[in-house]
Amino acid sequence: MGASSDPTQDASDEQQKRSEIYTYEAPWHIYAMNWSVRRDKKYRLAIASLLEQYPNRVEIVQLDDSTGEIRSDPNLSFEHHYPPTKTIFIPDKDCQKPDLLATSSDFLRVWSISDDRVELKCLLNGNRNSEFCGPLTSFDWNEAEPKRIGTSSIDTTCTIWDIERETVDTQLIAHDKEVFDIAWGGVGVFASVSADGSVRVFDLRDKEHSTIIYESSEPDTPLVRLGWNKQDPRYMATIIMDSAKVVVLDIRFPTLPVVELQRHQASVNAIAWAPHSSCHICTAGDDSQALIWDLSSMGQPVEGGLDPILAYTAGAEIEQLQWSSSQPDWVAIAFSTKLQILRV
């Protein structure tokens, strides 16, 4: 930065900078994290601990716009069995439904949030034959039909829950190996990725069949994350375990990636499609970078590969990334014990 002779200019620049990034330091390493979508709860997020012990914690935090501080409400902090692999607030922008938060670990749990406490509404165990279960790797809450949650498990299954009736809608063996992620693409359509290296799409109207959209080119390369583009459901993105590239797929042309994003310097951990634009995606990884890409030129060859349009460097490896659907100017990232929200 060059020297500036105008102190008031410096102060306003500083203010401007401050209001683009807010940081919260948790008392533990953060793994799961998610934005609330309710209109009456702006800048509210849930974060969860990654502790190598049975009791873990979930906190609900909120940015106080007037002070610029992200604060945790001690009444809305609660103990959780094992570290949650994912946490999601109910997709209810218009505040028509009870304020709920779901978490996955050994079981799927749905929590009810009131002003002064969080209570367990239900614990959902998809393994009817045993009190033990294959741990849940991930889940997704269906925005088009919010009574449905789909979970993925290391026992090779995906389970579709009706959370209003607290019953299993459908359970199917989705892959040959552990299922690592699941994403809804509409009311009755979901996709999953697995240690078997494939992306598969399922339609609940025809549960006997699935469509393989992509298989990783090298054998034994698990796919660990899946993002389905809500604004243009023809596109999805996936991450290969321990790989620095993100594979973007067009489901109309299975097996061949439409583009590969290759500007990360270390393993990619998280992907998030823009909630308000069909051609933007954010990726983050072990190189401490969060990159935003414009994919509007997708399908056309770009000399030397596509470059990101925005880059942000965090203080450590970024493990989690979420783009706010109700406030699309904001992306949240989690690294080490810090939660940061960034204006994009």
Image: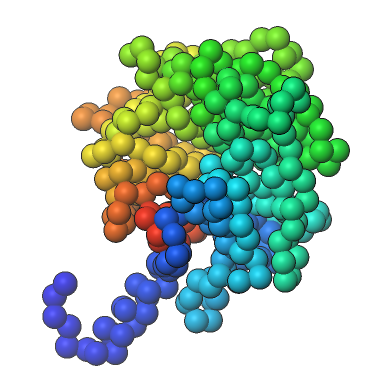
Residue 184 position, x and y percent, is: 63, 32
Residue 240 sits in quarter: top left
Residue furthest toward the top?
208
265 left or right of 173 in image: left
Q: Residue at x 34, y 72 (%)?
A: 17
Residue at far left of view: 2
Instruction: Tell me where residue 258 appears, x and y as whole percent.
Output: 40, 23
Residue 295 % position (x, y): 40, 36
> Would residue 77 be seen by someone viewing this image from the given angle?
yes
Name the foreground residue: 94 vs 6: 94
The answer to whether residue 307 is left or right of residue 61 is left
For the point 49% across and 41% down, the residue is 273
Q: Spot the residue most to the right.
A: 165
| Front residue of this view, candidates 293 and 91 | 91
Residue 312 vertical position relative to residue 180 in the rendered view, above or below: below
Q: Is residue 192 visible?
A: no
